[in-house]
Image (cartoon, coloured by chain):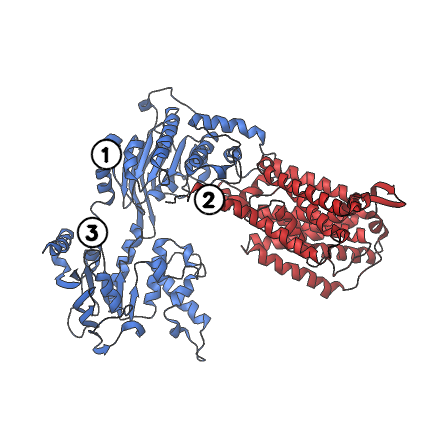
Chain colours: A blue, B red
Amino acid sequence: MTSDRDPADTEPPAIECREISKAFGSVQALDSVNLVLRRGAVHALVGENGSGKSTLMKIIAGAHAPDSGQIIVNGTEIADITPRDALNSGVRVIYQDLALFPNMTVAENIAFEGGNPPLSKAPGKRAILPASAALARLGANIAPSTRLGDLSTAERQLVAIARAISSDGEIILMDEPTAALTQDEIDSLLASVRTLAASGVSFIFFISHKLREVVDIADDVSVIRDGRLIATGPASEFDTDRISFLMTGNQVVNVRRTEVAAADGEPALRAVGLSLGTTFQQVDLELYPGRIYGLSGLVGCGKNSIGLAIAGLIPTEPGRLVLHGKPIRSARRHREIQYVPDDRLTEGLFLDWSIAENVVASSLAETQNRAHLLSSVRQKSLAEDWQRRLSIKTPTIASPVSSLSGGNQQRVLLAKALAPRPSVMIFNNPTVGVDVGSRAAIHDLIRAIANDGTAVLLISDEPAELLATSDDVGFVVAGRLRETHPADELTEERIIDINQSEVVA
Amino acid sequence: MIQRLFAHREAVLGVVLVVVMLLFGALNPSFFSAAHLFGVARSAVVLGIMALGVMTVLITNGIDISVPAIGVVSMYLTTVTLNAIEFQGTVLLAILLGCLIGAVLGLVNGVLVAWLRLPALIVTIGTLTLYRGGLLAFVGTERIRELPAQMASFGQLSLLSLSSGGRVASLSVTVLIWILLAIALSLLLKRTWWGRYLYAIGDNQEAAERLGVNADRTRISAFVLSGLLAGLAGIFYASMNRAADPSTLIGFEMSVLAAVVVGGANVTGGRGTVLGTVLGVFLITAVGNSLVLVGIPSAWQQVFVGGFLLIGVVMPAFRERRQRIKRGKVVGD
């Protein structure tokens, strides 16, 4: 460990990432990211979930290989970095769960290392001294013989840091270090981190919440969004407002739809004077095959209920739904109308069931054999078909849905809705809680569904999403469908303006 | 280190054991006769050896119900084999063979649980029935009374003989072997990385794997050890009873489990000590063997076994719950 010999600027940075790019399939998770971690500095890397933060963390830790770019650790480039290389260069990752053992003592936790010959001697009392030393470097007042499970979250975090430095870690990546801490605990963590930084240990904090603390904790701040590093500099140049603006800022507007089917002929589904108590009244709308109708409105305006009513999931008062020219009482029994809820975890998926079982759940009739019994062969082939079409990333469709990432869970939900080949699809905020890459993929998919001739109703809280996918946008204000505009006459600002102004009016 | 942390549980257990013994002694003074105490120690051996293995599995957050079946298979197969070749040599061969058979059966358990990620409880309930059923179906149902001579005499070897009132009370050599095994296992668990890894995968498997522990191999090693010790216990059982009966030790898994759990091994993994287990074994055996002495029908033994099992499971859960309330809910993300 070379520490406090030279002033910081003459030493090479602890880590330098040059032009790091990484794509997963068609998704650009990181796009030419440059990041410099100065020795002995605390660097906050801020970004929303799905911004590419964790991909960058995994690349520095050697868990993912970048598609292009260089990682330079302590002045030497490491080509094709592996977890072992990262470890040997002093890089330590502390994940949010801390990876500690509650039933062991603090000393045993700090001394723990995997991969030793099983019958070799493990340090017993000898572990106490190095553990005390590591804790002392942190300025932490924790007895090494305490059972870890008796410590608070903040103290456990210090133990995790002590383990990292006692194994000669000098570049520490911490995932959401402040997320579970109180203000006092953050202050004391900061004090420990400062002490260590003074002795040459460098930190990167990966943060998506609690922005207020970022400026206090960090020497340098970088903001990452949609895989791009959009700002970096000394913490003094940032404040909470600027950071949150940079994090969420102007979303990149996707390409709008071109070549849209004309809104003529018979609508696939027509609502005439649809009402439900005081929730919404006299809603008239027409969904045409091949077109996407966006529904915008403030939270609580009734747009979600309109979607549920059209899907037949809540009963409606007098009013009529006309499906392909035929009046129907409710869409409930019509598999031609499929609804994709926003809360996929509680409303949309059987989390413990396999992917295959989820996909075929709404099209079991199609998987019957001649004896009208469910055929497992047909179920499997149907599920595999949809796995391929929606490129659900999983080793096997037999694994439970709960094992998938958010984006892939959403694809399973979509597959389940699409499998019965509906002529009307209703989406409620289809990209809530989905990372950037999956988001774009889901938008592509919605467009593709429309191109196949399905009529789509897209309910969304995000202006950018409505613009990227819709052909027409209807505005719901206080339970009434006020006006409809072609999407190409709208901008994000205009959508926000209409929603806001109507409230005032 | 780990032992010191759980000294609390072992101290409690020690006190309970002493109280129980004093109680029995007060009700019937012959409880404290050398003959009875040696008898308790002797009948603790089979339970005790099996409990050491099951405790090791429990540390890894697993469970092994199949040990009595493994013990019976190893003792019966060994006896049949040695009788078939009319082997009259050293007892060590019988012990070796028994351990080997046990280890192989334990390996099957371990592979099913670790590689196929099956729940240990169901797997070992299955193998418990399968091993014993297989023995009865393919090898034999007859009780064998003629053991190889060395094997039969080994069980009667005496470490220490006291004669009182015309009766001779002798302490079996097997007791010493059990205690030596316990000390050896205790050292392995406390002093080697293997022991540390067992606790680690039982405590937080994901963390252990992230830090480079081969969780599958570690888990399998625990099941192999459990099988090996069960095989050894089976040989001891046959030796001490001078017979190999394929239909014995039925329901014995509950006593083993009760001893281990009351001894402080946690069914949720990551905890357990040899000392606690040995004390648990003595408690279960002392109570079970002495009921008749104080005039309680022996049918009550099952009530005690079940009671100890539940107490052993409830105590840590209760403590955990109290701590959780005291500490307040841990705030997540």
Whole-percent x, y for residue A61 in the image:
41, 39
Circle 1 — which element?
loop
* B202 to the left or right of A219: right
Badge 3 sits on which subunit?
A
Circle 2 — which element?
helix
- The residue wearing badge 1 is A238
Could you tell me which residue is drawn at 69 percent across and 52 percent down? B102
Residue furthest toward the bottom? A371
Q: Residues within 10 Å of mark 1 (few under 14, many from 20)?
A: some
- The residue wearing badge 2 is B324
Amino acid under disc 3:
Val
Tell which of A289 and B332 is nearer to you.
B332
Q: Is residue B90 visible?
A: no
- Foreground label between 3 and 1: 1
- The residue wearing badge 3 is A253
Q: Is residue A330 visible?
A: yes
